[in-house]
Image (tube, grey):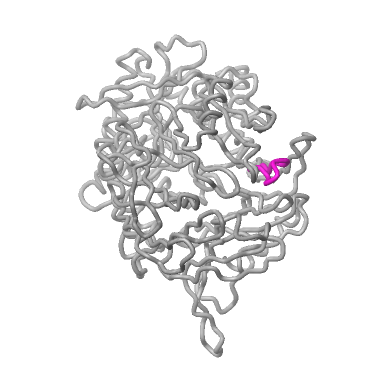
Amino acid sequence: MGSSMKLRIALVLAGLCFGGPVLAAEGTAAAAFGAREYVQQISLSPDGKQVALVAPSGVRGAKLLVIDIAAGTSKTILVSSGEPERLSGCRWSTETRLVCKIYAIIKSAENNVQYTRVLALNNDGSDMKMMTEAGNNRSIGVAQDGGSVIDWSADASASAILMTRNYLPEMTTNTRTASEDDGLGVERVDTVTLARRSVEKPYPNAVEYISDGRGSVRILGLRPTRGTSGYAGARTAYLYRQEGKREWLPLSQVVSGPTGYTGFNPYAVDPKLNVAYGFNEKDGRQALFKVSLDGSLTQDLVLARPDVDVAGLVRIGRQDRVVGAYFVTDRRETEFFDPELRKLGAALGRALAGRIVTFIDASADESKLLLFAGGDSDPGVYYIFDKSTRKLQDLTGARPQLEGLKLATVKAVTYPAADGVQIPAYLTLPAGSDGRNLPAIVMPHGGPSARDEWGFDWLAQFFAQQGYAVLQPNYRGSSGYGADWFQKNGFQSWRTAIGDVNDGGRWLQKEGIAAPGKLAIVGWSYGGYAALQSAVLDSDLFKAVVAIAPVTDLEMLRNEFLNFENYLQASAFIGRGPHVTEGSPAQNAAAIKAPVLLFHGDLDANVGIGESRLMERKLKAAGRSVELIEFKGLDHQLADDAARTQMLGKADAFLRTALGF
């Protein structure tokens, strides 16, 4: 990041600075659902007495609130404008000190590039300091990554943490003191004084470090040598240390590709058990294993499912202690390893019936827990639970602007694909509806390495509020269901993925849920790609297409990775062959009959806005109906209340016109 950019961020942060009645009602709904979630990130102080909460500020900014739980008071201590710097999250270093990460996306001639930086400040907003080590005018290159905290308990000093650092070599011209350090290393940094020392020397090919939560780095991830096109392969070699020793020993090899990855992929270290928790394949599904770090490398199965992948770990507290793992069938479920939390989770599940309870954080002694409970028609509430008093204290709602609205319920369904395979999906029907003869939307998720799950979805809920039935399919190409379901992902196996999406639309029609001629498709990111490509595969099925930040040309997508280290992996994921052209909506625009509405932010670093601009040109050249709405200064998430409100209102009006209701 250039010096002017760093100065701007520092100054901004330091400054803290169909008829009238129907349209009015629709505008109100668009504003309510378009407003960003109130709790963007939240953490509990080590003593359990305070909460740090990142909330929206203005239309696209964010603010850091410190809440005194006992007093019920809050104070804003930090504000980011969102132009360009954004506050992404904060966590407690001590009972009075916070560490925050900010990011900004900067437009260059070739790409939109994201930069991150880390800073520390007191819980009253004073003594703010940049923790990311600044480069100098001899540094070769620019550090995009400003570092990440990998351990909040570096040693006996309460204010010390372990933090990764990207070292840049320096030019040697006219100096003998230039540093040759290059790559990712780890430093012990005092969050109060900024005193720092190297803990792990940088390796040019290091991509990951995993600590034990007690100040010891136990696992190192290395990639093959970097070249002009990025890392030479998709293989990551993991090394580990035995307790109390410095020598690195082989742990595992993880090889990733279009169908997923193979090999033990470590995620956490349990210092008490002296094991690494990680994921590996078992019977075609992702399962959780633990591997002994005592030199034996004994591997034991911890949790596996015959139907779905084990999706992730559940971790709490200052040491990020592993307390369980979760998976998603029709709904998310947690398997607790900790007996006390298993019992508590069951009790809270009964007390908060109809909602899924998620543990977010804990005090240092784990006597107080920060948790979230939400459901499909309930955006959710954050609570503090005191183990000693067994008291559950309501902290704040996730989306207070939706209070008073009757929200829709979500039902898990399956429908048959053309080849007879049952596709899991979620159906959201307008509140009070009989589910018959409705305007309907198929809404494929992004990714494609992702999946939808039961719960509150602001986009689906908005359309249900406006009277639409919404179907969210976990088409083949989605993650969570194993390698056979993922196939070669939603690009190389696009015909299967898009076929499943279209079969979801046909099912809505066959079941009488969708009224004749009133079926549309809406998607974001890969979902936007699926929306467009669905109209290529079957031009008569959907009567309107809304695509938000979509991929439209696979070769263009490949080229967007050219200047990044993961180019070779991204290129392999996209693949080469006839599917690149056949599976690109922009290259087949003439096949699309339905009117198309596009939305895209011009600072999108995930999918460049050039993809939507190309799609617009191609559709216009083919004589098709298309409109592109560009949002200035916004990235892939369009995290701006006004932009999202405009998008929802515009999309709803577009669909009403196209579907004739």
Quick one: quadrant of the N terminus? bottom right
Q: Is residue 405 left or right of residue 522?
A: right
The residue sitting at 66% across, 45% down in the picture is 62
The x, y position of residue 368, in whole percent, is 65, 37
- Which is more toward the observer, 86 or 387? 387
Q: Is residue 620 visible?
A: no
Task: Residue 241: name its quadrant.
Answer: bottom left
Q: Is residue 157 left or right of residue 417?
A: right
Label count reads: 0
Q: Which residues are magenta?
A: 43-53
Q: Is residue 373 above or below residue 67?
A: above
The x, y position of residue 283, in whole percent, is 25, 39
Q: Is residue 48 visible?
A: yes
Task: Residue 61: name its quadrant.
Answer: top right
The x, y position of residue 311, in whole percent, is 40, 39
The x, y position of residue 54, in whole percent, is 65, 43
- Which is more toward the observer, 279 or 421? 279
Q: Is residue 644 above or below residue 274?
A: above
- Which is more toward the observer, 182 or 61? 182
Task: Residue 538: name its quadrant.
Answer: top left
Q: Is residue 503 magenta?
A: no
- Which is more toward the observer, 637 or 539? 637
Q: Is residue 51 magenta?
A: yes
